[in-house]
Amino acid sequence: MNIIKGMTRLALLLALIAAVPGFLGGWSIYRFEKTIKVKSLVKKKSLTPEEFQKRLDKELAQDFLEEKPSDLIKEMRKDPLGIIYQSEIRYHYPPNWQCATTGVVGSIVAFLIVFFGISGITRVSLWIVEGFKERKSG
């Protein structure tokens, strides 16, 4: 039965090696799944009344020639104070302690799968081999 003992040691070594990718995988999967994407408006620039009027006159002249309102005219009609907003996407990530906890759970699961998988396959294969051995007649 030294084969079982040796295979158990090998399974333990491989399971410890498999725990590291299990930790990293648990961390990254939790971080990816729990990340929140938020779209917000950020104040980009505020125009003075003179700059606003010049820009509005210029855009209105172009608008008259093109016979369709440009995006800037639509934006200026919405906000007559001359404040230009820019949309910005921000990501909110979960706290590191939650990611670490999930990483520990992932490493434990990877360890158990590899250890019991190799140990179980070893014991089942030895059981099958012993079943096919010839029995000595006494």
Image (cartoon, rainbow, N blue to C red):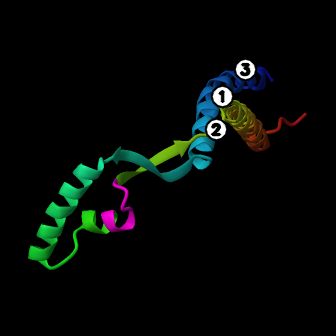
Which residue is nearer to you in this view: 76 or 122? 76
Residue located 72% across and 31% down the image: 104
Tell me the crowding category of disc 1: few under 14, some 14 to 19, or many 20 or more residues within 10 angstroms, Cα based: many
**Residue beneath label 2, please?**
26
- The numbered mark, 3 or 1, whose residue comes first in the sequence reads 3
Labelled disc at residue 19: 1
Q: Amino acid at mark 3?
A: Arg
Identify residue for label 3.
9
Q: Is residue 42 left or right of residue 116?
A: left
Q: Nearer the viewer, mark 3 or mark 1?
A: 1
Query: How far apart are labels 3 and 2 at the CA level?
Result: 25 Å
Residue at 53 percent across and 51 percent down: it is 38
Query: For numbered disc 1, what is the local secondary structure?
Result: helix
Q: CA distance from mark 3 to mark 1?
A: 15 Å
Measure how far apart labels 2 and 1 are at the Cα level.
10 Å
Q: Quadrant of residue 11?
A: top right
Q: Which residue is at a point 66% across and 28% down the rendered structure image?
A: 19
Q: Residues within 10 Å of mark 3 (few under 14, many from 20)?
A: some
Q: Secondary structure at mark 3?
A: helix
Q: Position of residue 42 (x, y in %)?
A: 44, 47
| Nearest-to-viewer mark from 3 and 2 | 2
Q: Which residues are magenta?
A: 76-82
Of residues 56 and 122, the one nearer the viewer is 56
Q: Position of residue 87 (x, y in %)?
A: 40, 53
